[in-house]
Image: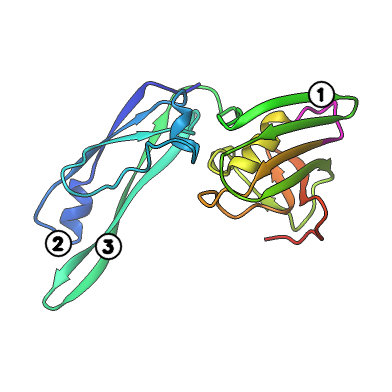
Amino acid sequence: MAHGQTTTIRTEDGFLATGGRSQRTWRLTVDNDVTARLDPRADTGGVRLDGSVTRVPVAGLGGGVYAFVVAGWADEGEARRPIAVGARFRLRGPPLALSHTEAVERVDHSGATVTVDADPGLGDPVTYVLSCTRRAADARQMLPEEAVTNPPVRNLLAAYDPAVEEVVLHTRRHPAYPNPVLGPVTMRDTGFEIRIRGETNTSE
C-alpha cells in the first residue's frame, strides 16, 4: 500500500506560461490508512485549495502515475480567463487494493452469496447487487481509484470473491454519496453487473 508518501507539486512553469506573476507549491501527502476522509459519516470534510493551503492529504491511491491539477482564472481587464495547471507524479508501491468503508457493520459469506450490511447513518434503505459477468462491449471502464470514492461500489467490490456468484449490499442512499454506478462495469479485466434489487437496471 502506498501510504505515508509525500510528493511536492511545483507549478511555477505553469503560472509563468499563463502570464501569472505569483508562484505556488502544494505538498501532497498520501495516506490510505486514513479511511475517514472517504466516508461521509466523518466530519473531516474536504480540502479547499485556496488561501494559504499548501498541504493536501490524499487517500485512495496506489502505486502508479497520477496527475495533480489546479484550475483557476487570470484577470484580463474586466474579464477572467480560465486556466489550469497540472503536474504528473509517480507513487511507489503495489496497485490500490479496495477495502470496506467505516460504515460496514457486517460481512457474511453464505454459499454462493456474500452479504454486506453498511449503515452510513442517513438516507433511504437500498439494496445493491453485484454479479460477475462476461465483459460487455458497452461496459464502463472503472479504475480502483474511482471505485474507492463511491462507497456503494467500493463496498461491493471489496467483498467480491471469485468463488461467489453475487455480492448483496444492504445500505442507505446517503445524501453525500455520488450517484450509484449501475449496469455493466469492467475493472482490472473482470466484468461485473451492478443493479438495484427491485428496480430495472439502466447504465449510467
- Crowding near the residue tagged with mark 2, few <14, some 14–19, many ≥20 C-alpha atoms within 10 Å: few
- Crowding near the residue tagged with mark 3, few <14, some 14–19, many ≥20 C-alpha atoms within 10 Å: few
Q: Nearer the viewer, mark 2 or mark 3?
A: 3
Q: Mark 3 and mark 1 in contact (Cβ < 8 Å)?
A: no
Relative to 71, 61 lies left or right: right
> Mark 3 or mark 1, which is nearer the start of the sequence?
3
Q: Which residues are magenta?
A: 160-166
Type of residue at label 1? His
44 is within the stretch colored magenta: no
According to the picture, the residue beneath numbered tag 3 turns out to be: 83
Relative to 78, 58 lies left or right: right
Residue 86 in the image: x percent, y percent?
32, 49
Report, in whole angstroms, how far the alpha carbon at label 2 lies from the one at label 3. 10 Å
Q: Residue at x 80, y 47 (%)?
A: 135
Is the C terminus in the top left, top right, bottom left or bottom right quadrant? bottom right
SS at badge 1: strand
Q: Which mark is residue 73?
A: none
According to the picture, the residue beneath numbered tag 2 turns out to be: 19
Residue 105 in the image: x percent, y percent?
65, 27
Farthest residue in the right direction? Answer: 111
Q: Nearer the viewer, mark 1 or mark 3?
A: 1
SS at badge 2: loop
Residue 108 in the image: x percent, y percent?
78, 24
Q: Which mark is residue 109?
A: 1
Relative to 181, 55 lies left or right: left
Q: Is residue 95 above or below residue 53?
A: above
For residue 132, what is the image quadrant? top right
